[in-house]
Amino acid sequence: MAIVELDRIHKAYENKVAVKELSLTIEPGQMFGLLGPNGAGKTSSIRMMIGITMPDSGTVKLFDKPFDRASLERVGYLPEERGLYKKMKVIEQLVFFGQLHGLSTEDAHGRATSWARRLEIDTSLDKKTEELSKGMQQKIQFIGSLLHNPDLIIMDEPFSGLDPVNAKLLEQVLLELKDDGKAVIFSTHRMDQVEKLCDSICLINHGEAVISGKVRDIKSRYERNHVIVEFDGSAEFLKSSEIEEASNFSGHAEIRLKPHGDAQRLLKEASAVATIYRFELVEPSLEEIFIRAVGGKADA
Amino acid sequence: MRNLLLVAKREYLEQVRGRAFKLTTFGLPAIFAVIIAIGYFSSLGIGSGRHLAIASDDPALAQLLRSRILGQKDSKATVDVIAPATPADRQQLVDKLRAKSLDGVLWVEDSASAQPKATYMAPSAGDFLMNARLESALNKALVDEHLIKGGMQRDQAAAISKGIDLATYQVKPDGAVIKSNAEASFWKGYVMAILLSMTTMIYGMNVARSIIQEKTSRIFEVMLAIAKPSDLLGGKLVGVCAVGLTQIAIWLIATAVFFATPLSASVMSGQLSIHISAIEAILFPVYFMLGYLLFSSLFAGLAATCETEQELQMYMPLAAAPTWLSFALIVLVMNDSNSVWSVAASLFPPTAPVIMFLRMASETPPAWQFAVSIGLLALSIVAVLWFSTKLYRVGILMYGKRATLPEIFRWIRYS
C-alpha cells in the first residue's frame, strides 16, 4: 500500500509554475527526501499533499485513497514556516493540538508529557511558549506533529535552527519512527542530511522532478571519480594531470578526477611528495549529482 | 464542528485571561462614568463664579435683573449694578473687561420702550450657555417689571413669572401611561449606543489583530494541516464573540446589582433617573452579536490580506464609517424616532445596532422593524462571511507584502 501517491500534479500561480507534472510514491517504513534549492517547489508539493492547496491538475492519494480531509488524522506535519501560540503554556498548546487531531484531553495530556520527557523538555511544560528558546519551541512543534501517532510524517526543514545535540536527538526519533513502519517525508535543501537519513529521494528544480529513486540506485549511476586525500607534506600533487578540480583544506583535499583519470597514478604522485593518511575513492555526493543534473541552473 | 469549538474555546480562554479583557471590562465603564460625571458636574457650574456688571438706564429693571441672575440655580455670580448708566460708564466697563476685572457686561437701554435693547459684552464670544442664562433672566426681569408697574407686589410678580415645569408621560403600545424623562432617555440611549459601537469595534478589531498576529507567528501553516480554514475563522469569530458577551453579561449583572442597592436610589434620582427595560437588556447582547459578526467577519477577511497591524489601519475609516454615520444621525433620530430616515437607518445593517438603540431611547419601535433589521443584519453577515472566507483562505498563507486590490479580487475568484 502506498502512503502517498502523487500523479502528475501541477500548480501554477499567475505566471509562475510552482509544481510541474510531479509524480512520486512513498511506501510505509520509507524515509523519503524531497530535495531542491529554495523556491524549487518543495513546500508547494507538500501543501498539495495535505490539502492546504489544491493542484490545478493531477491527483493526490493518501493511504491508497483519493485525498480527503479525514485522512489528515493520520498525518503529522511540521511546516517550514513554524508558529506557536506565544501566550499559551506549552502543555496547553500540545493538548490543544492533540485534541484537534481527535485525541481526548487526558490522552493528549499523557502523550504530550511522555514526548516532552523523551525530548528533554518536560521541565518547560508549564511555561509560556514565549519564554522558551527557538530550539525548545521547535521541539514543541515537533511533538505537536507526532502526538496523534501519525502514519505519515512530513517534516519541512526539521533541523534548521537546532544545535547539533538536539538535531541528533530528533534524527534518532525520526529513524525510530521509520523503523516502526511510519513513512517520513523530509524536505530540505541540505543534501548532506538527506544523504545520511533517506533511502529514497526526489530532486526538484523549478517545480520539476529532476532525479528520483532510491539513493543507492541514483548514486550507482554515477562514476566513482571523487577522491578524498588526507596528507601531511607538499600539496604539489594537486597539480597532477589526472585532476579536473581540487580543493585543499590544510591537509584535507577533495578531488574530482578527469574523465578516465587514473586514481592509482595520482596515489603514486601524492605519496612521492607527502605522507598519505587517507586516500579514498568515493561516489559523488547528492549535491554534486544535483548540480550536474540541473547543469548549474538551480535558483539557490 | 468539534474543531471549530476547540478553536473557539482556545480563543476565548486566551482573551479572557488576558490583561486587555480585565482592563476593558472594569476600566471602560469606569472611564465612562468619570467622563459623564465630569461632563455633568462641570455643566452645573457653567456661568457660576463670574463677575458681571449690569448697566441700564432703568435702575429698577437693573435690580430686578440682578436678583433674577442671583436667583438662578447654581449661580454663584457677583453682579454689580450701574444705573442709570451713561455712555462714559460704557467705556469704563469695556476697559474693565479688557483688564479682566470683569467677566461680562450686560448693557440694557431703551428700557421704557416696548422693545428694550440688550447687549452682552465679554472677552469670550463662545459662552452660549451664559448667554442663554442671561437672556432668560432678562426676559423674566422685564415681565417682573411690567407686572410691578401694573400694581402687583414684587413677590407676586416673581411667583407668576417663575414658570412651571412640564411633566412628561409616555403612552406605551399596550396602553400603559408611564412617567418619562426625555433627558434621561436621551442619555440612556446615547450611552448604550456608545457602549454598543465601542464593544462591536473593539471586539471586531480584536479578531483582525489576532489574525494578523497568527499570520505573523506563522501558526496558520500548522493549523491548516489540522483544521479547515472555515473552522479556524468560525472558531475565532465565535470565541471572540463569547468574550464580548461575557463582558456584556458582567456589565449587565453589575448594573442589576447596582440598581438593587440603596446607593442607586440616591445617585440615579431626578434628572439622572434611568431605567433599563427587559427588552433593552435582551436586545443589547443580540445587537452586539450581530453588529460584531458583521464587523469582525469583514475585518477578518481584510486582516488576512495584511502583514502588519499598521497595514490594517488603512482600513480603519471603513470600520469607523458606520459609527460616524450613526452618531451623525443622533439629532434626527432623537427628534423624530419614527421618521423615514430614522426607520431606514435602523434597518440599514451597518447602522442598525446603534440607531435601533437610539430609537428605543425615545420609543420602542414596532416588532416588525426589529425583525426586519435583525433579518437584514443576518443576511449581510452571511454575505460578508462568504467574501471574507475566500480572502481568508488565500490570505493567511500569503507572506511578504500586503495584497493589492486587484490581487484581492483575484483571490476571491480563485478560492
Image (cartoon, coloured by chain):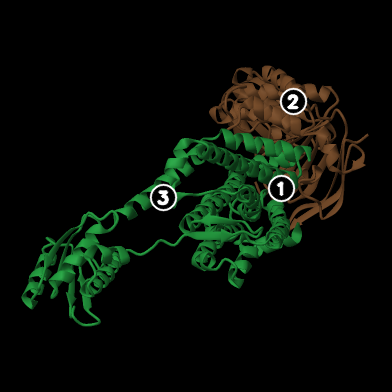
Specify whether residue A157 is in view: yes
Question: Dot 2 corresponds to which residue?
Answer: A105
Point out the frontmost of discs 1 and 2: 2
Q: Please, is residue A190 above or below residue A280 in the view? A: below
The amino acid type found where label 1 is placed reads Ala
Q: Please, is residue A97 above or below residue B251 in the view? A: above
Question: Dot 3 corresponds to which residue?
Answer: B36
Give the secondary structure at mark 1. loop
Q: Callout 3: 10 Å neighbours few (<14), some, many (20+)?
A: some
The chain that appears green in the image is B
Point out the frontmost of discs 1 and 3: 3
The chain under label 2 reads A
Give the secondary structure at mark 3. helix
Is A75 left or right of B333, judged from the image as shown?
right
The chain under label 1 reads A
Question: Dot 1 corresponds to which residue?
Answer: A40
Is A59 left or right of B290, judged from the image as shown?
right
Point out the frontmost of discs 3 and 2: 3
Is A205 left or right of B175, judged from the image as shown?
right
Considering depth in this image, is B134 or B116 the residue closer to the camera? B116
Considering depth in this image, is B176 or B9 the residue closer to the camera? B176
Q: Quadrant of the N terminus of chain B?
A: top right
Cα gap from disc 3 to disc 2, whole angstroms: 48 Å
Residue, x 56% and y 48% (percent of image)? B276
Q: At which x and y percent is residue B402?
A: 59, 56
Which of the 4 image quadrants contains residue B68? bottom left
Q: Residue furthest left?
A: B88
Q: Colour of chain A?
A: brown
